[in-house]
Amino acid sequence: MSGYLTTHVLDTARGCPAEGISIDLYRITGEERVHLKTVVTNDDGRTDAQILPTEEFELGTYELVFHAGDYLDRTGTPPEEPRFLNVIPLRFGMSEAQHYHVPLLLSPFGYSTYRGS
């Protein structure tokens, strides 16, 4: 099996997929942080394609940056300045050529993640 990376975002406060969240993918090498791409979640809270498909997959350290503040604003979460959760970075390592699924479970005042399947 060759490796690839996927994600999805669930809004746990509203009990639904989080549509329209912009997500940046970075590769981390030492102190260097290189932007690879930006994707947006669809109506199922997923991206339309693998974030890092097999042909682009490399072992190493990566970071997904979820732009949650814009989504929270659009969904009617009461505004605050600054917003408690605005930009959420998740840094993780991929050490094997496998499927890595790194979802975000989001609410206005908390989030969690895990390595899914």
Image (cartoon, rainbow, N blue to C red):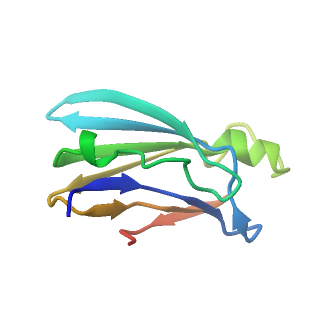
- Give the residue at x 34% y 35%: 26
Instruction: From this view, report whether residue 69 is shown above or below residue 19.
Output: above
How far across and down, in percent of the image, does residue 72 sit? 73, 48
Quadrant holding the N terminus: bottom left
How far across and down, in percent of the image, does residue 20 sit? 68, 44
Front residue of this view, candidates 3 and 113: 3
Question: Which image quarter: residue 44?
Answer: bottom right
- 66 displayed left or right of 35: right
Front residue of this view, candidates 109 and 113: 113
- Give the residue at x 22% y 46%: 61
The number of numbered badges drawn on the structure is: 0
- 70 displayed left or right of 37: right
Front residue of this view, candidates 83 and 62: 62
Front residue of this view, candidates 33 and 6: 6
How far across and down, in percent of the image, does residue 55 sit? 25, 42
- Give the residue at x 42% y 45%: 51
Quadrant holding the C terminus: bottom left
- 106 displayed left or right of 80: left
How far across and down, in percent of the image, does residue 102 sit? 41, 60
- Give the residue at x 29% y 27%: 34
Instruction: From this view, report whether residue 25 is shown above or below residue 47.
Output: above
